[in-house]
Image: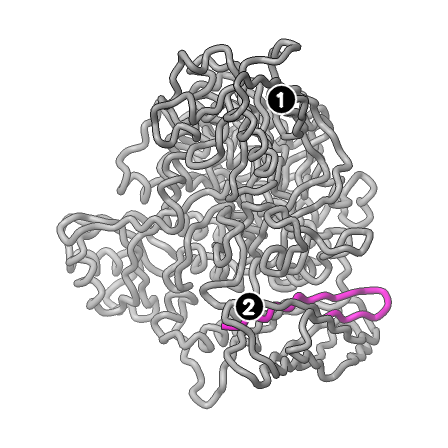
Amino acid sequence: MSSSFLSFLLLCLGFCHVSSSSSQHGTYIVHMAKSQMPSTFDLHSNWYDSSLRSVSDSAELLYTYENAIHGFSTRLTQEEADSLMTQPGVISVLPEHRYELHTTRTPLFLGLDEHTADLFPETGSYSDVVVGVLDTGVWPESKSYSDEGFGPIPSTWKGGCEAGTNFTASLCNRKLIGARFFARGYESTMGPIDESKESRSPRDDDGHGTHTSSTAAGSVVEGASLLGYASGTARGMAPRARVAVYKVCWVGGCFSSDILAAIDKAIADNVNVLSMSLGGGMSDYYRDGVAIGAFAAMERGILVSCSAGNAGPSSYSLSNVAPWITTVGAGTLDRDFPALAILGNGKNFTGVSLFKGEALPDKLLPFIYAGNASNATNGNLCMTGTLIPEKVKGKIVMCDRGVNARVQKGDVVKAAGGVGMILANTAANGEELVADAHLLPATTVGEKAGDIIRHYVTTDPNPTASISILGTVVGVKPSPVVAAFSSRGPNSITPNILKPDLIAPGVNILAAWTTAAGPTGLASDSRRVEFNIISGTSMSCPHVSGLAALLKSVHPEWSPAAIRSALMTTAYKTYKDGKPLLDIATGKPSTPFDHGAGHVSPTTATNPGLIYDLTTEDYLGFLCALNYTSSQIRSVSRRNYTCDPSKSYSVADLNYPSFAVNVDGAGAYKYTRTVTSVGGAGTYSVKVTSETTGVKISVEPAVLNFKEANEKKSYTVTFTVDSSKPSGSNSFGSIEWSDGKHVVGSPVAISWT
């Protein structure tokens, strides 16, 4: 990732609203009531243009939308936008938002290897599944997009390959079957793309998009590694699925008008799964471009998988929480890259590193704390230009984590004449160790070790240190643990919908990379690699996208909700020894606000026994339960839908595979669910667990008897609260149905508000 983009990410925490003063122009997304087009117009685009002309002589249509929404995007002043809102047929005029990217061994860790062909057929329906990825584009020359052994492109595919800077349509093949780019929204705000710095085409000059799409559905590549680390066979989660990329992210960010245009086109192209490792902030669904586009995709049977965000371990830090989106948090693998920090007092501390190059001399070297080698108040952070070369030259430097990129700190040390770096986590990251391909010998250590090392280097009269890089180790326990950066619940938009949905591998993930940038993404990094190891919920999201593609190939008739249900209800919440999954941020057991339903377990998801299904009508009822106005519902659903005034709508009745209960006083809270048998006949009994005696959980009926496949049965859960707790208190539990062969689990989160 480029340094300029990293700077943007630091500035853009949450939704970056691209605002305009009353006289300045900004980009707006205009939702139109398609059915209200006057008969004097033959085409909707003509009506849109006429509506626009009524408020502005100079404004032009950036995009017209047919699938994700009905409407268009354009540049307007605030007064023009307000005036347009009064025109007939206009539902809403919403300002553009800028989104951020949420930035090998994984198949084996998930139980997917060459012996699982009986679960997932290698040909036929499997290779007809198309995974669409909205990101920074693709590096088509990567071996991960080899189409060797692939049959003809599926006849259902309606997409294509767009040419542009450094990209011709012939770069697509039977594996990479689609490649498009969307820049009108970006350029209308940021100005023309500098084609000397990034390709105005589907080509990926950043690396992020190549990494995510190859994680989801990269072809099998033997001998893959990053500089010798994590060597082995790389394969995506669905290596026989097809890939279509939609480039929506540029050096300055990802803009909602472009994102909506990409979703619009992906729906028309006929993708089966949409993977979006981007997001930002929280907004009501009728204002959230990703949520709106995802609703339209869901209606077409497309599962939409999104990253939960990298704002953990803070509570209420989630992105992409709409219930028609599968929201994915991040956990670790059982693989690590240890590197020792060796101190002159005889103490050693294990950190992590992906440095490859000339090792430090086999002796202890002078050691200095960056805060004592700088005149800047934040000198300890090793920001650009803050280190004094005379104090650093020939020494190992200790830097504290925070503000600027980890790899950039090492570059700063190197530029100032330092020979190595020990990078220490602070309280924000705790004991979570994320490995980087540093430009000099370096290791990252946890907060506890960092505190001890910092005390030594600042108090010893002659501190010395060394760094020993140890390579790759596997079989690390415990694993997985929830990543500290993984965004956490509760869900701040709809507290009664538990998010994230589940976690998947997202720490130190090996996947394909661009050769337009080095593994660090820094301008000073001249190294070029075919694969890179990076971390983020950006990495966990495409794992689930690929697994959804596998499930779609086995069960083509399943809805997006059914696929998500299978992944959630079969996820695991404990290690093989029965102990609960841990949260690296606390060192304690993680909760459903951290891991959702648990860690994905694909081999059991193919046969979940029961599923919780949802239809478009169910989601419309959910919007009614939120007391959305008819125009707000129309903004999300593109239809004129009126809530039934005689009906009592409740968020608690949305047929979700998890339970979030918000307690605002003693009493009974009732939730209704309906399960569908996909495992044939069977008798399921319920098992309820709860951490607290202050809430009684009862399920009626306690036994569900299915006589045949696809039969539906309903049950009611009553949470009876007889004790009060301080506001902000939480308690957790689970509801599990089992017929002796299947265990259908649902997490429970109870919050006192």
Locate residue 257, reporting x and y percent. Answer: 35, 50
Give the foreground label among 2 and 1.
1
Q: Please report whichever mark, 2 or 1, sits nearer to the chain's N-terminal start.
A: 1
Locate residue 112, reporting x and y percent. Answer: 76, 43
User: Would you place residue 486 above or below residue 337 in this image?
Assistant: below
Q: Which residue, given by chain and number where applicable, does mark 1 sit on?
A: 343
Seen from the viewer's position, the closer of residues 699 and 467 is 467
Is 618 situated left or right of 342 in this image? left
Magenta highlight: main SS: strand
Separation of disc 2 and disc 1 at Cα?
43 Å
Q: Which residue is drawn at 56% across and 84% down?
A: 666
User: Residues in magenta?
Assistant: 735-753
Locate residue 681, reporting x and y percent. Answer: 83, 73
Seen from the viewer's position, the closer of residues 306 and 343 is 343
SS at mark 1 in the image: strand
Q: Which residue is drawn at 40% across and 80% down?
A: 642
Q: Which residue, given by chain and number where applicable, does mark 2 sit on?
A: 729
Q: Residue at x 45, y 34 (%)?
A: 202
Residue 534 magenta-highlighted: no
